[in-house]
Structures are given as structure tokens and as C-alpha cells.
């Protein structure tokens, strides 16, 4: 990143809600301060990225890359990043996911109230996974559980994980995608239909269907989730197709949508800016809805 | 001033597009401060014979010659392509948009190189989308791969007189096309809508490696939201001179140099 970039004023939550053109063609940016850490209820327009990743410490430049993520969040006006760390090779074993979660906990300490942690586990190692979730949520203050594609979410091996998340009152962010072909590298990937099935089995669970803008046919996913009110939709991903946010708002309702980037930062920001929704709706998507999920744990 | 070098009009076979008429796209452009857009017919991507879509495009943009810059979709493996090219030149098309994977031909095939040569002789720019949609969301009916960067590099090297726009692409920074002193002619420019900024620094790397005159602003409208591309410019926050280059000067330089047949 060019060093002189550091002098550029950040995009703030207020400019997030403005049209892009005004900012690009030279209208002055409104520089509201980034929300301070503290009581979430005081943040009327907080911006929370519901889907982020920290870098595995096996990567030699993980520190710089993690710092870059925080710096980009600063510049984009993102107050909090809900992050997990995945093992480089999957399916993850207990040693691998414990190590990742320990590193996430370290990042939470380095960036208090900035980085929130999802506890990543492989449900196939059930006893170890349940122990790890309880340790991370109750002992380390993690905000949720991250599940990837080791098992389809409707596999009974996943059910005890869901039941523990219900007990702890934390959401589960579940990797998902619907392609009209079987992705050979992800034979057990879940999709919106599977998550809707799981939601019907556990109506008290808080489920988040991950990265609709990086998970194949987003129209299919949105329609599949219509009748699953306890599944929130994470809008993150690198795909910037026109209309996805508006369709999701129309079919699912604004209160089920969560702003996210999944490391595609300008895509995440840009699609919220672009959406034909009023400022109140965008504020809910950007942070209020996620705050409501987080408050359930605190209550 | 903003010039979008990556826009489309008309319907697409596999997904409803909200802003597919000239009036609808103009409304979107106006709302984002975009002054002019290079457009081609989205329907031509899946038509076997794309020429009717070219004719429809010209009719659609007719009342707005100051806002739209028409590029023709021509399939050099289809009968009559040379006649279609002549017709498109007479209709005022300023460039070509090629879909080698959707239309099942090789960029380095003899008819395609012939098409590029003829279009170049008439001042046309050659726009090549690396993809139409993210391949993960493709229809069950088709399995069309992205155009590999290596194939773009081959045609760049083979036709140094031609001028190429590469749109809807990514992965340039790690390829020969994004390397400094790569031995290739400087006859190609890269559109930014799908390039990463910040975390992977693709735009920053390309500016450093190729120079600021090699990137061009584009959105992918109406397939894609325009705002992510605008946000890239905003968060890159280049100085005003660099911002102007990417937003319009680099595109205008080539477009203004490409006199349409009727203007000669």
C-alpha cells in the first residue's frame, strides 16, 4: 500500500450511505469518528463486518496482512470485524482448529472491541469441537461459531454443535454456496436449502448463511431461505452483481441481512452503497442487525 | 468526467438485468456521475448470430450519441463475419467485443486474427471480457471457462498494432500481462471493476508495474453494481491527476484516437 495513502480520510459510516459518485467526483467527505469501543447499544450507526478472516500464522507475513485488514477497516469506516481463522488444510483436526482459535483470541486481545471471534471447529471431532466452543465462548469471549464444509449442515454430526450454540446463545456462521454443478473440491458444501432444513429442525438457532455473493447462484439461495426466518443472510463475497441486496431485502426482509466483506472490501461496501434502500434499512444491514444477534449472548 | 469502458445493454440469457434499456442505464449512469459508457449488446453473448443484437444496440442508443460508445460483438467463426464487420463500421461502431469462449473460437485462430487486423485498420478497439459472470453461478446449461490470461498475452504479442481493452478480469498482477518490462507491446489496457485493491493490492501493483496510463475505469453495468468500482477509486484515493487518468483520460485517449469510418 503506498505510504501516502495513510493520509487519506477514511470512508465513514455516513459516506457509506452516500452515493458513490459524490465521493469520487470530489464532494467533500463527511468524517465522522469511528465508533469507540464500549456498550454496543450506544452505537446508533455501527458498521460490523459479519464475515472476516485472520491469517494463519503459518503464513510468514500474517502480521502485516492482519494489520492491513485492520487498516482497511479503518479507512472504510468498519467498526468491528467478526473473524475466524481456518486451518490451511481441511478437514481440520482438533489440534489445528484449537491453534487457529488461540490465534484469534490473541488478535481479539490486540484489537479489543475491534476484532470479534468466531470459534472454528470441525464437527466431525465432536467431543473436541464441543469443548472448544464452550472454552472459546465462555472463557475467551468469542461471539459465535464458524463451520466450514467438512460436513453438510444437515448431517446429524452437526446437531450437537447447533444445540450447544443455542445453549450459549451465539450464532453459527456456516459456509455455503449453491452451484448448479458439484464443486469437486467441496463435495459436502451446504447451501441455503440445507440451512433452511437445519433451521426448521432448530427454530431457536441463530444461523447465518455465509457469503451469498461468493456462493454461486445467489437468486437460488435467497429464494431457498425465504421460509427460514432464523437464518440470516451474510451479503459478503467478491461477486458484485446488480440487484442482489434488493432481492434479498424483498424476499427475506431487511432485518435478516448482514453486511459482510469476506475480505472483498470494496465489493462489500459498494453493494450496500448501491442498493436502492433507504438509510434506515442500510443502517440495519450495516450493523444494527448484527448487534441484535450479539445482544442475545449478553442478555 | 467519468468514462465507463465496461457496460452493456439488452437482455442476458441467464439472469434478469434491471437496467437493460438505454433510458434505464442512463438513469443509473446519471445517478453515479458517469458521463459516457462503452456498450455492447448483452444478448449477443448467447446469440449464435450476434449481428441482430448489434443492430438493436445502435437503434437503442441512437438518441444518445454523446453518452454511449457502441462496440460490436462479432463471432469470427460464424458465417458472414466480415460482412457484419463492414456493416458495423458503417453503423458507427467504435470497437469490438470478443467472446472467444462463449462463441467457441481461439483468439489466435486465423479468422480471429483477420478480424482483429481489419478492425484495427479501421481504428477499432478490441475489448475482451475475461468472463461474463462468476463461474460459480453459471447455469446448468453451459460451462464456459474464463479467457485465460495467457491467451490474452498471446494475442497481444501477435498483434502489436491492435489496441486491446481487457474487462471483467482479475489475476493480472501475477501474470505476464502485469509484469514490468514483460517484453509485450504496450497495446493493452486493463479495466478495474473486478481487481482487488488494498488487501491484495492488484490495482496498486499494476499501476507500479505498468504505469498509470494502463488502467481504465469500468463497472460491468448492468450486470454489476457500479459502486464497487467507484469505491475502489475512492479508497485508492490517488492524486487528482491519477484519478483523472483512470476515470476518463486513459479511455478518452484511445477512443478519441479511434475515428469512426464515417468521421474519416
Image (spheres, coloured by chain):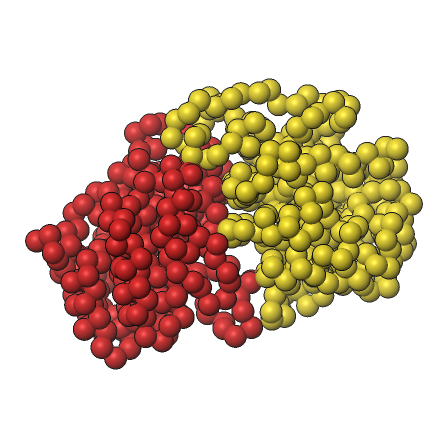
Chain colours: A yellow, B red
Compared with B48, A124 (above or below) is: above
Q: Position of residue B32 (x, y in %)?
A: 42, 38
Quarter the C terminus of chain A occupies: top right
Q: Give the side of residue A197 with respect to residue A258, left or right.
A: right
Q: Answer left or right for B78 relative to A188.
A: left
Q: Identify the residue at horizontal 51%, vertical 62% (top origin).
A: B15
Q: From the viewer's perspective, is residue A73 above or below residue B122?
A: above
In this view, the residue farthest toward the left is B264
Name the residue nearer the viewer: B15 or A213.
Answer: B15
- Is B216 located above or below residue B158 in the figure? above
Q: Position of residue A210 (x, y in %)?
A: 68, 51
Residue A98 visible at all: no
Please name whichever residue, B68 or B115, is drawn nearer the observer in this view of the structure.
Answer: B68
Residue A95 position, x and y percent, is 79, 50
> In the visual, does A290 lie left or right of A140?
left
Report which quarter residue A91 is drawn in. Answer: bottom right
> How many numbered marks are there?
0
Q: Residue furthest bottom?
A: B79
The residue sitting at 80% across, 62% down in the picture is A197
Hey, which quadrant is residue A28 in on the image?
top left
A22 in relation to B156, above or below: above
Residue B76, x across and y down, in percent: 27, 73
Q: Can residue B42 be seen?
A: yes
Q: Nearer the viewer, residue A101 or A179?
A: A179
Which residue is depicted at the point 86% across and 59% down?
Answer: A201
The residue at the point 67 percent across, 32 percent down is A80
Amino acid at each position: 500500500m503506498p505510504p501516502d495513502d495513510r493520509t487519506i480520510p477514511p470512508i465513514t459510516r455516513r459516506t457509506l450511505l452516500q452515493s458513490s459518485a459524490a465521493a469520487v467526483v470530489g464532494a467533500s467527505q463527511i468524517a465522522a469518528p469511528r465508533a469507540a469501543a464500549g456498550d454496543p447499544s450506544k452505537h446508533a450507526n455501527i458498521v460490523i463486518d459479519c464475515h472476516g478472516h485472520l491469517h494463519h500464522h503459518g503464513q510468514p507475513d500474517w502480521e502485516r496482512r492482519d494489520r492491513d485488514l485492520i487498516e482497511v477497516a479503518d479507512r472504510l469506516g468498519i467498526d468491528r470485524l467478526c473473524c475466524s481463522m481456518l486451518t490451511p488444510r481441511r478437514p481440520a483436526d482438533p489440534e489445528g482448529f484449537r491453534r487457529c482459535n488461540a490465534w484469534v483470541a490473541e488478535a481479539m486481545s490486540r484489537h479489543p472491541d475491534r476484532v470479534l471471534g468466531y470459534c472454528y471447529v470441525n464437527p466431525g471431532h465432536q467431543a473436541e469441537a464441543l469443548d472448544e466452543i464452550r472454552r472459546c465462548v465462555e472463557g475467551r469471549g468469542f461471539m459465535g461459531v464458524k463451520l466450514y464444509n467438512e460436513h453438510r449442515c444437515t448431517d446429524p454430526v452437526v446437531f450437537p454443535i447447533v444445540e450447544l450454540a443455542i445453549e450459549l446463545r451465539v450464532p453459527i456462521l456456516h459456509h455455503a454456496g449453491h452451484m448448479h454443478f458439484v464443486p469437486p473440491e467441496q463435495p459436502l458444501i451446504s447451501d441455503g436449502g440445507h440451512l433452511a432444513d437445519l433451521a426448521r429442525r432448530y427454530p431457536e438457532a441463530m444461523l447465518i448463511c455465509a457469503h451469498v455473493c461468493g456462493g454461486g447462484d445467489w437468486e437460488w439461495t435467497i429464494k431457498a431461505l425465504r421460509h427460514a426466518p432464523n437464518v440470516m443472510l451474510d451479503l459478503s463475497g467478491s461477486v458484485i452483481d446488480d440487484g442482489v441486496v434488493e432481492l434479498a431485502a424483498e424476499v427475506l426482509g431487511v432485518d435478516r441481512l448482514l453486511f459482510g466483506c469476506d475480505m472483498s472490501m470494496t465489493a462489500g461496501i459498494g453493494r450496500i452503497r448501491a442498493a436502492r434502500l433507504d438509510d434506515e434499512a442500510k443502517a440495519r444491514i450495516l450493523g444494527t442487525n448484527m448487534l441484535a444477534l450479539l445482544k442475545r449472548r449478553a442478555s | 468526467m467519468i468514462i465507463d469502458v465496461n457496460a452493456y445493454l439488452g437482455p442476458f440469457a441467464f439472469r434478469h438485468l434491471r437496467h437493460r434499456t438505454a433510458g434505464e442505464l442512463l438513469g443509473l449512469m446519471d445517478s453515479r456521475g458517469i458521463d459516457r459508457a462503452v456498450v455492447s449488446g448483452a444478448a449477443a453473448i448467447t446469440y449464435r448470430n450476434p449481428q441482430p443484437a448489434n443492430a438493436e444496440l445502435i437503434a437503442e442508443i441512437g438518441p444518445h450519441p454523446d453518452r454511449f460508445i457502441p462496440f460490436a460483438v462479432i463471432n469470427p467463426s460464424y458465417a458472414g463475419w466480415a460482412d457484419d464487420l463492414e456493416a458495423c463500421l458503417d453503423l458507427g461502431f467504435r470497437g469490438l467485443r470478443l467472446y472467444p469462449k462463449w462463441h467457441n473460437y481461439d483468439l489466435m485462430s486465423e479468422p480471429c486474427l483477420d478480424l482483429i487486423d481489419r478492425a484495427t485498420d479501421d481504428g477499432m478497439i478490441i475489448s475482451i471480457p475475461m468472463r461474463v459472470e462468476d463461474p460459480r453461478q453459471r447455469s446448468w446449461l453451459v460451462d464456459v471457462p474464463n479467457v485465460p490470461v495467457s491467451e490474452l498475452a498471446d494475442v497481444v504479442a501477435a498483434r502489436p498494432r491492435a489496441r486491446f481493452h481487457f474487462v471483467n478480469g482479475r489475476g493480472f498482477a501475477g501474470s505476464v500481462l502485469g509484469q514490468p518490462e514483460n517484453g509485450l507491446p504496450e497495446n493493452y489496457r486493463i479495466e478495474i471493476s473486478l481487481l482487488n485493491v488494498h488487501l491484495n493490492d492488484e490495482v496498486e501493483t499494476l499501476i507500479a508495474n505498468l504505469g498509470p496510463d494502463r488502467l481504465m475505469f469500468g463497472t460491468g453495468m448492468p450486470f454489476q453494481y457500479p459502486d464497487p468500482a467507484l469505491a475502489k477509486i475512492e479508497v485508492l484515493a490517488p492524486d487528482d491527476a491519477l484519478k483523472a487518468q483512470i476515470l476518463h483520460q486513459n479511455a478518452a485517449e484511445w477512443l478519441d484516437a479511434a475515428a469512426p469510418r464515417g468521421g474519416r
